[in-house]
């Protein structure tokens, strides 16, 4: 049988202090002498004592827990984002609880209610398009929350992320500078993501010189990207470049073009969006728009903790994305 873990009263007896003093040490209270703190910490190590979060919450009225609701865990950009949140929170003795909404308002609301019941003190929400009931619930409970993956300085909720519209516009202009004037944009369902809507609007805004963008909507998956190629190849004259609003879609486009006997970038150039970990490993390596997922996770975690600890107001924060140039876009002669 494993060794039985110690209890708080055992730690107090072992270190020769009161239970209240042990509690102060466990809660990082500075009103404890350094030598006393060290004695208590040594006792907790000898006794394998681990504080009971539920008991501590009853005493302090705090759970030090922040919730994040994301649309999916199938996209590695969210994995990078969540890992950064958790890392930043653990440094401040905070915990992260996670739920997936599948871009469904009803599921998101149900998840939020469960997370609140668990004692979540702050919320991280992807995008800025959320049900009014959820927003009203968080405001009534006076729960601090922020929108991520977007930046909108006019929003009455703090947005911590990037300008999707501007980044999409920069991608279109990049392809135009490489000589491409016949460009197809492949994107996921507009009804599921305000980020996709913003990217489409940004692409359109950059199209004033080309006026020849063609948009294809498909499922946000590798299979969706592959299926989009069938529609793209029916366009005449055939596009010279395909801009995908997700690296996942770009991978599917690679497969679809390969099935059609076409080569990237010799026959068709392809550009992605996200800079997922594997995008540099494709053949050819994928040119893509890099999103600052890790920086965003750290930024939102740090802001929420400051709000919960010091009542520091949440503020919108723009993070920079950039184009990662690799080998999937061919330079063409200027076309008129």
Image (cartoon, rainbow, N blue to C red):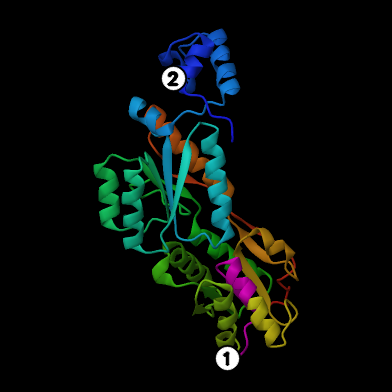
The residue located at (58%, 87%) in the rendering is: 230
How crowded pointer 2 is (Cα within 10 Å; few <14, some 14-19, many 20+) is rated as some
Of marks 1 and 2, the one in the foreground: 2
Relative image position of residue 63 (x, y in whole percent):
39, 34
Q: Is residue 324 left or right of residue 200?
A: right
Q: Is residue 89 visible?
A: yes
The local secondary structure at tag 1 comes to: loop
Question: Considering depth in this image, is 172 or 103 the residue closer to the camera?
Answer: 103
Q: Is residue 49 magenta?
A: no
Q: Is residue 296 left or right of residue 239?
A: left
Rendered position, 333 above or below 174: below
Q: Quadrant of the N terminus?
A: top right
The residue located at (57%, 8%) in the rendering is: 35
Q: Is residue 320 visible?
A: no
The residue located at (69%, 77%) in the rendering is: 334
Q: Is residue 190 left or right of residue 46?
A: left
The range drawn in magenta is 236-252
The residue located at (57%, 47%) in the rendering is: 83
Question: Considering depth in this image, is 60 or 193 the residue closer to the camera?
Answer: 60
Relative image position of residue 110 (x, y in whole percent):
32, 56
Tag 2 or tag 1, which sits nearer the N-term? 2
Rendered position, 173 above or below 230: above
Relative image position of residue 238 (x, y in whole percent):
63, 87
Which residue is identified by label 2? 23
Rendered position, 75 above or below 65: below
Which residue is identified by label 1? 234
The local secondary structure at tag 2 comes to: helix
């Amino acid at each position: 049988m494993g060794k039985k873990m110690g209890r708080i009263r055992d730690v107090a007896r072992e270190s020769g202090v009161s239970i209240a003093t042990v509690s102060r040490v466990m809660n990082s209270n500075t009103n404890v002498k350094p030598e006393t703190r060290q004695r208590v910490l040594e006792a907790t190590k000898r006794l394998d004592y681990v504080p009971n979060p539920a008991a501590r919450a009853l005493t302090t009225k705090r759970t030090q827990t922040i919730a994040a609701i994301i649309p999916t865990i199938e996209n590695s950009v969210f994995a990078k984002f969540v890992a950064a949140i958790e890392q930043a929170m653990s440094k401040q003795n905070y915990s992260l609880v996670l739920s997936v909404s599948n871009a469904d308002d009803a599921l998101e609301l149900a998840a939020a209610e469960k997370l609140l019941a668990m004692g979540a003190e702050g919320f991280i929400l992807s995008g800025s398009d959320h049900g009014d009931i959820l927003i009203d619930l968080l405001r009534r409970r006076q729960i601090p929350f922020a929108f991520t993956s977007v930046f909108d300085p006019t929003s009455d909720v703090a947005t911590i992320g990037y300008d999707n519209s501007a980044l999409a516009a920069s991608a279109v202009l990049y392809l135009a500078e490489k000589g491409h004037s016949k460009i197809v944009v492949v994107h996921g369902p507009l009804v599921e993501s305000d980020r996709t809507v913003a990217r489409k609007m940004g692409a359109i805004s950059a199209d004033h010189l080309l006026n020849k963008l063609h948009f294809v909507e498909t499922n946000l998956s590798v299979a969706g990207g592959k299926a989009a190629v069938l529609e793209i190849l029916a366009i005449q004259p055939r596009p010279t470049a395909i801009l995908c609003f997700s690296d996942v879609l770009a991978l599917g486009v690679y497969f679809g073009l390969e099935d059609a006997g076409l080569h990237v970038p010799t026959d068709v150039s392809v550009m992605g969006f996200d800079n997922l970990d594997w995008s540099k490993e494709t053949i050819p390596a994928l040119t893509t728009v890099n999103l600052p997922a890790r920086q965003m996770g750290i930024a939102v975690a740090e802001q929420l903790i400051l709000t919960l600890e010091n009542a520091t107001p949440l503020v919108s924060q723009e993070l920079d994305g950039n184009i990662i140039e690799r080998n999937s876009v061919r330079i063409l002669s200027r076309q008129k």
